[in-house]
Amino acid sequence: MAPQKLSSFFLIFLVLLQSLSSADSQAFIGVNYGQVADNLPPPAETVKLIQSTSIQKVRLYGADPAIIKALANTGIGIVIGASNGDIPALAADPNFAGQWVNNNILAYYPASKIIVVNVGNEVVTSGDQNLIPKLLPAMQNVQNALNAASLGGRIKVSTVHAMSILSQSDPPSSGLFSPVFGDSLKALLQFHKENGSPLMINPYPFFAYQSDPRPETLAFCLFQPNAGRVDSGNGIKYMNMFDAQVDAVRSALNAWGFKEIQIVVAETGWPYKGDPNEVGPSMDNAKAYNGNLINHLRSMVGTPLMPGISVDTYIFALYDEDLKPGPGSERSFGLFKPDLSTTYDAGLSKNSQTPTAPVTPAPATPTTPVTPVTPAPKPTGSATWCLPKPGIPDSELQSNLDYACSMGIDCSPIQEGGPCFEPNTVASHAAYAMNVIYQTAGRNPWNCDFSETASLTSTNPSYNGCTYPGGNL
């Protein structure tokens, strides 16, 4: 091939590769599509809604034919489920498993992009001693049926676990699976290892906050500015509960010798309302958690023990499920309403696919309603910058700095050799990072709050070769 044609070929190849990479850049964001409700829109309308967002995967709790058909030819990955009630028959009869695969997968695949079959939900922690021993045989029979259909390498078989499979999770480096589940859980993990399937887990910082409802815990759970928590086992400072919970599972897997098993977050979310006696549910908290989680995933920062990757994460949930029993929060996790409007803006629209700074609403309500704090007025002028207030201790500024740089913003200018490294002080570095957070989060007054340690200025703080972003970015 002539050199000019060769270079043209590689140029076209690189353009195609970049476009494919961009198209797949949101593949780690999924949503749970529950159906315990009597007011949900038709599946076809729901699929159009999903296509208008950056959601690339949908988890079903069953295998509803109408939904699976509606998702055909969309490219959206589908996780289907066999119910806990199906487990005994799947375990006892390979023919039943084969028929289940024929009816719920082969009838729709590959037009409907089924990627995972979950056999049961939170079975191991259910305490049902009649069901738990049948889980692995059921998974094996489903796997064998997929293998027989030459789909064993394309569709994975798993099951979903509650965080209570861990006997220890704090600090994250001490994460251990409960010995109560012992050999049964080890056998399941061996199945995952042999078949290349993921461990699917349900981490909920919301429940962690309910058990420890302090303001500093709320900030830690919502990805908001906080002092962080140092893991006494390895010295790593964690800046949010999500990373801490996921890494506790990673540590547990490593401790049992299953380092190659991938983790998938099958459920996580935050309710936007609840009963009067419930701690934590609020619109601000839900928007902050889900919005900041999505930003965190998009940043590709990863977790301290799994850096540089974003764990596949299915947000709970697409809609409220008004027929669910339990406290009011159980019926209030929906990102969207039955009329297809958003409950709140979590940053899922296709127009917001680039990483942004964390959502920091005017102080989220921790427990009972409090009088809202009115933010200081935004200085007039074409450009504003966010800087630390005078007299803020270095310890608080260091917390702001750690938080900002952990959320995926570009902190290279304040690293050694960067144009803003000098003066090499916590105050100078924090000022730069806090301003970048403000500029990329929408430049609202509440984006320059940092637990009341920052304020806005119309005076450009740039100096020498160090340029502070400001104005219209």
Image: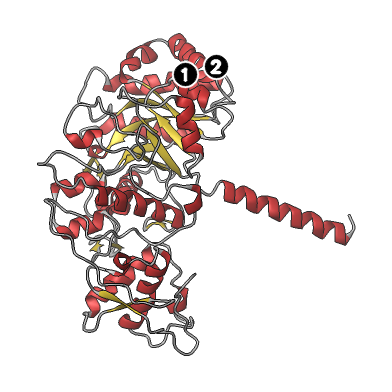
Distance of mark 1 from mark 2, alpha carbons? 9 Å
Q: Judge whether 347 appears above or below 384 on screen.
A: above
Quarter residue 35 falls in: top left
Q: Nearer the viewer, mark 1 or mark 2?
A: 1
Residue bearing mark 1: 65
* Residue at the right extreme, as displayed: 2
Q: Residue furthest bottom?
A: 464
| Percent x, y of residue 140 | 43, 22
Please give the residue where the numbered disc 2 appears in the rendered image.
107
Q: Residue 305, position in %: x, y?
A: 37, 55
Q: Are marks 1 and 2 in contact (CB under 8 Å)?
A: yes
- Asked whether 100 or 468 is in front, the reply is 468
Q: Is residue 168 visible?
A: no
Label 1 sits on what residue type?
Pro
Which residue is found at the position 40% from the left and 35% from the top?
A: 340
Residue 4 position in % (x across, y down)? 86, 61
- Vertically, is 82 above or below 321? above
